[in-house]
Image: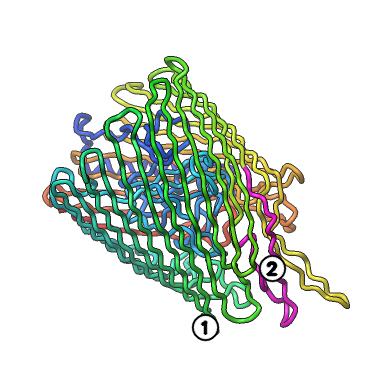
Amino acid sequence: MSSNHFTRAPVARTLAALSLGASIAAPVAAEERAPVLENIVVTATRVERDLSDIGRAISVVDREEIESIAGQSVADVLRFQPNISVEGGPRAGSQTVNIRGLGGNKVLQTIDGARLSFESGHRPSYYLDPELLRNVEALRGPASSLWGSGALGGVIAQNTLEPTDLLGDRDLGGFVRSGFNGNNEQLTTTVALAGQADRVNWLVSGYYRDSDDVELGNGDTLQDSATEDYGMLAKVNWAVAEHHDLQFNVRANNVDGSVPANGTAEPNETSNFLLDRDSETVNASLRWDYNPGSALVNSRVLAYWNSVDIDESRLADGRADNTQLDEYGINLMNVSDLGWASLALGADIYREDFEAERTGSFRPAPPEATTDVWSAYAKAEIPLAAQWRMDLGLRYDDFTTEADNLNDERSADDTSLSAALVWTATEWATLALRYDEAFRAPTAEELYTTGTHFCIFPGFCNTFVPNADLEPEQAANVELVGQFSFTDTLGADRINLQASVFQNEVDDFIEQVVSDPSFGPFGDAGTTTYINVEQATLEGFELQGTYQRDALVFKLAYGQTRGEDDNSGDDLTNIPADTLVADLSYGFLRNTLFAGVRVTDAAAQRRTDFSENEDGSVFDSYTVTDLYASWQPAWVPGLKLDLNINNLEDDFYTRAWDQVPEAGREVILFARYSF
């Protein structure tokens, strides 16, 4: 494998693809090209702000880009953003997001402003299907001053479809979208209908997906990667009275299929058994917005309920397990314009009820546990001068976890601070120097799991030992963020750039430690427990930019992260490879045909010097090319055809730290009819 990080072959393929497109269609005129670099409003900061003015590193993937990627999961649609990688291999249900070297439950996810926290063993944690997404935002870096526990690496804010996305100025509208993926013979169908009358608008959407096993780049199939899943979204917005608005939102999702107990690894007959897994999730929320036009009152109350119910049975012997989480919460927030400052005050209160049943002997015994969290936060934006602003954030969280089956309780609290100095240097440049803290409270499973972890032979079993003294994981991040926007640089063009440099100090990592067995006269199979270890430093930088001229759009994203254990000097695991993504697209036939090529070049990950890596394993570099096109034929109003060819050259490759190779070539065709 070449040691070059960025090869020349992708550039040649890009030019060839554009030459082919230019030979079959005339370019669209400049005045006919709709602008694509419009201002973007983000919600991951809790208070809606223009992306160019917030002084944070955030990527936004809108509906158009989601469809051009044809991602299989929320994590999958974020894979081209800088310093963001997908963990878990090609099984969509096993995929999670890694931001700047921190993944899993160290990255918080929210859906329509409500947090969703579920982590249990190797079970799925992302349940919203991309078919229901309006957009998804990835806030990179610690953010507990905004969201509390879990935001060590960042926040994935998922926003679902709105009725206005389908209606425009019509009273009734909708779409039918159906597609086929030739790699795993996946059929997907989505139907949505929306309407509005007087003070009410509404939306109902549902999807169904059925797939076979994934084919890898070497021609093999990924055993037990087939799934059948379906879900729905219903949303009603009601302007109850002047200044008062209500929104009711309900979602449901079901995923059924056989999968290894650890879907991120290959199955085996000794530890990673094959399961029949049926996952059901239900989410409901009610939001009240009150905005009387006063500078002091702009309020929101959001009440929500999340339910996750997973039934599993081992295919070999039918052994059944059940895992359940019910989460109830309420968010309160008011934003005031005080003249000399903008002030947001809020409170988050939520409860997590977790329980699990494990049948059979010699099994882990997760606790029946309840976690209660009470928190309050403040966020202020204070102008200091014409071009200077200070952003301050402070949050206090009090959390209690009680294990009913062990009659034990753990209480703790934490304070998270955020401070940023924002300088609007010119109309085209904004710089922010910021400091952000974050924490993650230990989960009920980490605190209180008992029972058997594994057996070396019958009667000689490693057991779990609870540790109710676990401290929360802590992060403190210093970062410099730059936002730049230029127009008419090389003619009638526009350039948007975002760059950031960061250093994140993370302490008290929670890790599972398995002690070695002893085979002497008084043999001991050892124990498994969770402990706080490592003081670590993660540092790096990222760059993303977009260039548009007439019908031509070029996007570039690059991310680099380094991680080291401050005590031992070992490299940290799960640090993503240095990755460059280049995306070039062009519009033809008066904006009715768009075609593009996207190239991902990941360097080899050779920073794997840690004590457990006794054989010196490293991860190879890879380069993957995707093609995509979208066509809206003028003679069939409302029809849109999307074509994706992912992994064009059918490469056989594995992402750094994953145990399962990625999917081979995928030819995906979607047809959407809007009415």
Judging depth in this view, the residue of 194 and 240 nearest the camera is: 240
Tell me how far mark 2 sits from mark 1, CA to CA.
24 Å
> Which coloring applies here?
rainbow
In the rendered structure, the answer to whether residue 114 lies left or right of residue 236 reads: right
Percent position of residue 165, x then y: 24, 47
Label 2: how many Cα within 10 Å (few below 14, some 14–19, many 20+): many
What kind of element bears circle 1? loop
Residue projecting furthest to the top = 386
Residue projecting furthest to the right = 521
Residues at discs 2 and 1 in contact (Cβ within 8 Å): no
In the rendered structure, the answer to whether residue 463 lies left or right of residue 426 reads: right
Label 1: how many Cα within 10 Å (few below 14, some 14–19, many 20+): few
State whether residue 507 appears in this view: yes
Amino acid type, mark 1: Gly
Q: Is residue 519 above or below residue 88?
A: below
Q: Which residues are magenta?
A: 445-474
What kind of element bears circle 2? strand
Judging depth in this view, the residue of 319 and 541 nearest the camera is: 319
In the rendered structure, the answer to whether residue 446 lies left or right of residue 141 reads: right
N-terminal of the pair, mark 2 or mark 1, is 1
Q: Which mark is residue 318?
A: 1
Percent position of residue 156, x then y: 45, 47
Tell me where residue 493 sits by quadrant.
top left
Amino acid type, mark 2: Phe
State whether residue 603 appears in this view: no
Of the residues tagged 2 and 1, which is closer to the observer?
2
Q: Is residue 354 above or below residue 426?
A: below
Residue position marked by numbered label 2 in the rendering: 464
| Residue at x 76% of width, y 46% of height | 568
